[in-house]
Image: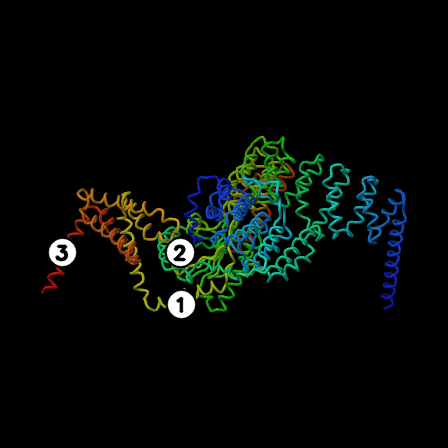
């Protein structure tokens, strides 16, 4: 199953072809919905520099195309987000159409469709997905409410729970007679449909500490460590004009961060985000975490949102502002913030043109441990995650004294620096790393099985380079280690399918590459030192 | 007590009289057969409420043979009664989109439609159709209707009209409205992509001052336009009104940076008095008195402008002198409190 965090890799594949061409091609290839997945992310480069209307229209064409290609599971949160929050007719119509790309109707979609009716009933408009160039057209027009109605019809028996709500909509004075008739027809279809109902859907818990897989945790931990160096450059200014660094505020206690901006014209997004953050603050206090957790709202719009504006905006929505509850703008390092959080936002110049709703849970190192995106976060989930972090921190603090922890950090920093210094700059060695990581983790990527021959070829190329360069570099030891790694991976990892073998193989090949890239004099010292150690150990053993 | 009773008695009598007058007017309208009597009856009635009267008024309104003045009056008098009648509203919108109808009637329908957007639920249900009609009016032969439709669509942040307005700025022969108006309408939506085009217009020295003023308003909160607006504020070759608009825009968007720009303007004896006065006034009312009055050097410089201030030659010079006096008083209070 393609998951949301696989999408960044796909995005790079589609940087070159024009978006309209990709959509048109996908529409004629049923089952090719995954080609469109990269365009669902608000931060896709295609949307940079465009007006908000244009971005929404183009995204709408992507959603509408899922009706023809089928709707991949990974796209569903994006579709539901639109139905939950958007008032723009183009997007809502397209999202309703996209749902009909699912293989089967699901009862869990109904609340989202009903929400969309409420969102769009005063702002509906005629829209068209006729143009291959993603342009506005007067041909084959539809409206958001009409498409929602059609989707209810498609849901059939799965929408039975919503019949009472649909009947209420029929009585709504804000609905035209034509739509009233259409909704009535949908009710008739629903009531007469005898198909069994699928009640699975649509729980999308945030990706976080409570449900993340082991390897995903490792991957995230490595990514966070790397990125955390970048966030040291981030400077923030709070609602009282106090300036802090990212590290100063977000380390020491677990934290919750949301993003917003005061010029957001969608009341279901930023305004609601801050209002819900206020509610979360109350729930955190009630749960007893008020003082153990930091809460922050950070503006996407650092230029416009000065401290006075942010303070007024957040206070008007009832948010508590104090030492542990702050609202920030980014004074320096916005690029790092965008990359570190992989924020779902895009800009036209300095102005936000489109964004998602997102909440992040950070541990007491400031590392991201939970993400709640697209759909409204569930307070219980967030509080559960924070509770675990607070508990974990409390246990850690009692076990490791303040004296030992800095020492461990210092050692880790030294080791990391050592690895970075000696990281191979040789392209062959780099290819070896990529192929090692690729082969040992490729079972996560369904489509990448086709790359197996390439990974093996790169590994063999690396071995050849090590062998040929042995005389000039550090001898045959790196070659023997890397060969052992390859043998371990092929025999135990692929044939005997031992997962542990993958990690052993990584270790051997990395060590081989590391030793190969070491300066010869350093390698000699290390070898002499190791030999001396072995001699001493041998003598002691035989005494 | 007796006074209250008298008051209620008189009120009751007035209401009854008004009711009787209304009923008489309705009856007169129902009975009227020729144009003159219909017109007179419509003028005498505040509105039409009886179903029969409403039906008669609608027949008159939708009949192209009816006298224009009668149709105009019928529209106004019957509007409240048909505000939730979807069929009647659709026919009304039909008049708006029909270029064979008299322009005066179509303009009146447009005005009444604007009222209905606030007051009528049924009209809200027809919004999609209404927007489509407005888009059609962008090609209408009536200039006034074209401009009204353009403005209404801009209020709705309609993408089509935003594209047309931008196209009009780049190619004036295709313009729907004047450049100043186009920029004003585009600025209704800060998320529209007008910034580079409008910035180019503002940078052009040949641009008309009215257009510049609208451009400055539109670009006030655009970070990329900040240096441009600052330059205009400092440019003595620009018209005063343009520079004052720049000052107001800069102060609203970049208040902390505005202090650094405003102070040299205030102290510059060669500067226009109007600009100096406006800058000093803005500084005096800055949100953080500390940032303004803590600068003792600046305060002393304003105080020492005594000699140049004594040579006030005009009313605007006098205004500046008065402003400077107020500023010094305020500064003294602030500094003494510290």
Can residue A156 be seen in this snapshot? yes
Q: Secondary structure at mark 3?
A: helix
Q: Earlier in the sequence, mark 2 or mark 3?
A: 2
Distance between the alpha carbons at the discs numbered 1 and 2: 21 Å
Seen in the picture, residue B101 relative to B55 is either above or below; the reply is: above
Q: Secondary structure at mark 1?
A: helix
Q: Quadrant of the N terminus of chain B?
A: bottom right
- Determine the chain carrying the residue at label 3: A
Q: Nearer the viewer, mark 1 or mark 2?
A: 1
Q: Where residue A253 sits in the image (x, y, percent)? A: 41, 62
- Determine the chain carrying the residue at label 1: A
Dot 2 corresponds to which residue? Answer: A247
Please name whichever residue, B185 or A83, is drawn nearer the observer in this view of the structure.
A83
- Determine the chain carrying the residue at label 2: A
Dot 3 corresponds to which residue? Answer: A532
Evaluate whether label 2 is on the same chain as label 3: yes
Instruction: Check the image and tell me how it is coloured.
Output: rainbow
Q: Nearer the viewer, mark 2 or mark 3?
A: 3
Q: Where residue B320 sits in the image (x, y, percent)? A: 61, 42
* Marks 1 and 2 in Cβ contact (< 8 Å): no
* Marks 2 and 3 in Cβ contact (< 8 Å): no
């Amino acid at each position: 199953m393609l998951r949301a965090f696989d999408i960044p890799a796909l995005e790079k594949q589609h940087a070159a072809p024009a978006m309209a061409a990709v959509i048109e091609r996908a529409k004629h290839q049923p089952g090719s919905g995954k080609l469109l997945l990269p365009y669902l992310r608000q931060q896709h480069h295609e949307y940079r520099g465009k007006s908000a209307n244009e971005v929404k229209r183009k995204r709408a064409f992507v959603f509408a195309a899922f009706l023809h290609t089928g709707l991949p599971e990974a796209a569903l949160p994006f579709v539901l987000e639109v139905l939950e929050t958007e008032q723009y007719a183009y997007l809502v119509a397209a999202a309703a159409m996209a749902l009909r790309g699912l293989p089967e109707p699901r009862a869990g979609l109904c609340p989202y469709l009903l929400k969309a009716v409420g969102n769009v009933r005063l702002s509906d408009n005629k829209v068209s997905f006729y143009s291959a160039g993603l342009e506005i057209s007067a041909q084959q027009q539809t409206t958001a409410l009409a498409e929602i109605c059609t989707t209810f019809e498609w849901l059939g028996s799965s929408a039975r729970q919503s019949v009472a709500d649909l009947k209420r909509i029929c009585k709504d004075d804000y609905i035209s007679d034509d739509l009233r008739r259409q909704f009535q027809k949908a009710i008739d279809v629903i009531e007469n449909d005898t198909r069994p109902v699928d009640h699975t859907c649509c729980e999308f818990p945030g990706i976080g500490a409570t449900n993340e897989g082991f390897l995903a945790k490792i991957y995230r931990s490595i990514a966070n460590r790397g990125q955390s160096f970048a966030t040291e450059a981030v400077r923030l200014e709070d609602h009282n004009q106090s300036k802090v660094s990212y590290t100063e505020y977000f380390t020491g206690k677990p934290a919750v961060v949301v993003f917003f901006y005061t010029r957001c014209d969608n009341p279901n997004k930023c305004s609601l985000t801050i209002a819900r953050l206020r509610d979360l603050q109350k729930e955190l206090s009630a749960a007893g975490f008020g003082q153990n957790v930091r809460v922050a709202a950070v503006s996407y719009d650092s230029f416009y949102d000065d401290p006075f504006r942010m303070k007024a905006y957040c206070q008007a929505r009832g948010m508590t502002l104090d030492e542990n509850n702050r609202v920030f703008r980014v004074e320096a390092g916005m690029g790092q913030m965008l990359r570190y959080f992989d924020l779902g936002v895009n800009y036209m110049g300095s102005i936000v043109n489109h964004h998602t709703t997102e909440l992040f849970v950070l541990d007491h190192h400031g590392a991201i441990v939970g993400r709640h995106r697209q759909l409204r976060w569930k307070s219980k989930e967030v509080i559960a995650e924070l509770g675990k972090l607070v508990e974990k921190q409390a246990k850690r603090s009692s076990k490791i004294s303040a004296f030992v922890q800095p020492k461990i950090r210092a050692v880790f920093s030294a080791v990391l620096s050592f690895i970075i210094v000696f990281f191979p700059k040789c392209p062959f060695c780099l290819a070896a790393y990529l192929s090692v990581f690729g082969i040992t983790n490729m079972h996560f990527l369904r489509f990448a099985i086709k790359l197996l021959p390439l990974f093996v070829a790169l590994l063999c190329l690396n071995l050849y380079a090590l062998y040929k360069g042995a005389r000039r570099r550090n001898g045959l030891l790196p070659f023997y280690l890397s060969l052992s790694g390859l043998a371990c991976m092929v025999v135990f990892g692929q044939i005997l399918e031992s997962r542990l073998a993958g990690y052993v193989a990584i270790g051997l090949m990395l060590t081989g590459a590391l030793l190969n890239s070491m300066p010869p004099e350093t390698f000699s010292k290390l070898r002499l030192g190791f030999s001396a150690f072995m001699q001493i150990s041998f003598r002691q053993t035989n005494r | 007590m007796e006074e209250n009773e008298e008051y209620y008695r008189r009120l009751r009598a007035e209401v009854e009289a008004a009711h009787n007058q209304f009923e008489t007017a309705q009856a007169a309208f129902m009975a009227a057969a020729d144009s003159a009597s219909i017109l007179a009856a419509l003028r005498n009635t505040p509105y039409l409420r009886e179903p029969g009267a409403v039906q008669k008024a609608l027949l008159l309104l939708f009949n192209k043979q009816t006298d224009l003045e009668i149709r105009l009056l019928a529209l106004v008098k019957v509007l409240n009664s048909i505000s939730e009648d979807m069929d009647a509203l659709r026919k009304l919108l039909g008049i708006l989109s029909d270029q064979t109808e008299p322009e005066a009637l179509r303009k009146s329908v447009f005005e009444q439609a604007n009222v209905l957007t606030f007051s009528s639920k049924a009209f809200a249900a027809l919004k999609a159709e209404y927007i489509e009609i407005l888009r059609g009016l962008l090609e209408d032969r009536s200039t006034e209707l074209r401009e009204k439709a353009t403005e209404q669509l801009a209020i709705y942040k309609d993408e089509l009209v935003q594209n047309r307005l931008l196209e009009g700025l780049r190619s004036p022969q295709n313009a729907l409205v004047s450049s100043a108006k186009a920029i004003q309408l585009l600025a209704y939506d800060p998320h529209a992509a007008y910034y580079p085009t409008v910035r180019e217009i503002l940078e052009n020295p040949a641009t008309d001052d009215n257009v510049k003023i609208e451009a400055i308003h539109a670009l006030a909160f655009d970070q990329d336009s900040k240096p441009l607006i600052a330059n205009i504020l400092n440019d003595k070759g620009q018209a005063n009104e343009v520079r004052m608009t720049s000052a107001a825009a800069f102060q609203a968007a970049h208040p902390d940076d505005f202090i650094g720009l405003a102070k040299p303007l205030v102290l510059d004896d060669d500067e226009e008095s109007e600009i100096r006065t406006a800058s000093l006034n803005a500084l005096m009312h800055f949100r953080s008195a500390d940032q303004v009055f803590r600068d003792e050097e600046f305060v002393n410089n304003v105080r020492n402008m005594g000699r140049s201030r004594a040579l006030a030659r005009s009313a605007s010079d006098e205004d500046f002198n008065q402003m400077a006096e107020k500023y010094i008083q305020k500064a003294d209070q602030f500094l003494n409190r510290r």
